[in-house]
Image: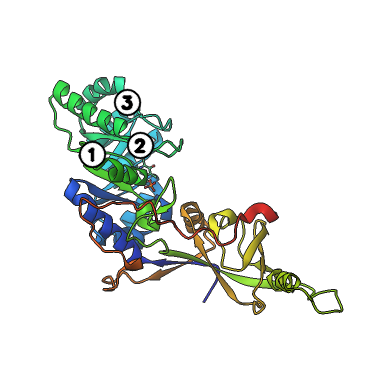
Amino acid sequence: MPAPRIEIDLRKIRHNTRCLVDRLRPRGIDVIGVTKGVCGYPAVAQAMLNGGAVGLADARVSNIERLRNASITAPISLIRTPMLSQVEQVVSLCDASHNTEIAVIEALSEASSRQGTVHDVILMVEFGDGREGILPSDLEVIARRVLALKGVRLKGIGANFACLNAAPPDSVAMNRISCLADAVEQSCGVLLQVVSGGNSASLALIHSVGSLGRTNCLRLGEALLLGVEPLTQTKIAGLHTDAFCLVAEVIEVHARERSDRTTKPSSISERIAEVCLPHARIILGIGQQDVDAVDLSLPPGTNLVGATSDHLVLETRDRRTKVGDEMRFQPNYSAVLRAMSSGDILVELGPDQPEPASQPNGHPRGIGSTQSLVSKDERCPPPRSPRPLEHV
Ligand SMILES: *Cc1c(COP(=O)(O)O)cnc(C)c1O
């Protein structure tokens, strides 16, 4: 099997999506599957749709083009404010886009009028993340301007949290979105179909406050792909955290000198030290170009020594490691993104078949509305090499 490669278990992604869809639906919330973490990889998008996501979203037009080229016909929205230079493609590829700039919306209006279609606009409101958004006090004025344009339809409003600042959404912000939606509807005489209440970081809030007010859709990437709540990296109960596995090949092994001593270690502590010392320094054919080493969970018994553009250097206590062996790593969200955009890493897909009857980690599926979405007592297995960068 060629290496390096990233193995993706589509069943796990489908299962994660299905679990969250089932838990959010009773609260009136739809799941939109966000595919930017896998560069719009079509099979992953399809697994999200098979798990019950009502639509897809991505931050890049190129990723959305990839989805459309793979004949995915589901609704897709662009979740980064469109570039003026890309409005024609945005209108032809996307059903909707998330917007913050009236100049862009005017250009979208012209493009969709030219193309004889109608493009849906979701206005993104700033709630303190500092990355994108219209100030709440400007929202009504901008909404009115959008309503006056041909070729675009005001579909709803949305917010984003915990991207630029690690500030989690809170119930105050959720209340404000609901109030803003009501205010726009009343003053402009429209119905907002969508109130898009954030990303995977909003899931924890449902756990703590139970309701997200008028929010009727969430845009979920990390939770579906990796089964964790982004800010705390807490495992979400019943979800798989290991849908992705990065596999690299050992290209060099340098066994450590066994010991310079002539006598056998005498004390127990000496013997323990001898056994626990790394046996070999190994070099793998994967590097910074493909992944950031700190974003990987290392196999048990290994420490990170360092990484260069094309090499990953580890120490291992496993005496059997030899050239040509494969090592398996669990990537986090940014490692998945980097690996999927590397171009040098083969993607190996597991099938998207019906889920096996057994449930992951013994957790019940389809948790009801009184049970938690995120279980605080469950943590992802920590990176197995403690504090990996210390050896660099
Ligand atoms: C990336 C992104 C998401 C998805 O975030 P996750 O934390 O992966 O769920 C949702 N909305 C916007 C606007 C984004 O940029």
Q: Residue at x 32, y 68 (%)?
A: 362
* Ligand 1 sits in quadrant: top left
Q: Residue at x 71, y 69 (%)?
A: 277
**Is tag 2's residue or tag 1's residue first in the polypeptide sequence?**
2
Camera-nearest residue between 106 and 206? 206
- Calculate the distance from the C-alpha at mark 2 to the C-alpha at mark 1: 12 Å
Q: Which residue is mark 3?
A: 102
Q: Is residue 318 above or below residue 242?
A: below
Q: Indicate the secondary structure of the residue bearing disc 3.
A: helix
* Circle 3 Cα neighbour tier, 10 Å, few/some/many (<14 / 14–19 / ≥20): some
Is 8 displayed left or right of 258 in the figure? left
Q: Indicate the secondary structure of the residue bearing disc 1.
A: loop
Q: Is residue 144 above or below residue 6?
A: above
Q: Which residue is mark 1?
A: 215
Q: Mark 1 vs mark 3: give the one in front.
A: 1
**Is tag 1's residue or tag 3's residue first in the polypeptide sequence?**
3
Q: Is residue 372 visible?
A: yes
Q: Amino acid at mark 2?
A: Pro
Q: Which residue is mark 2?
A: 169
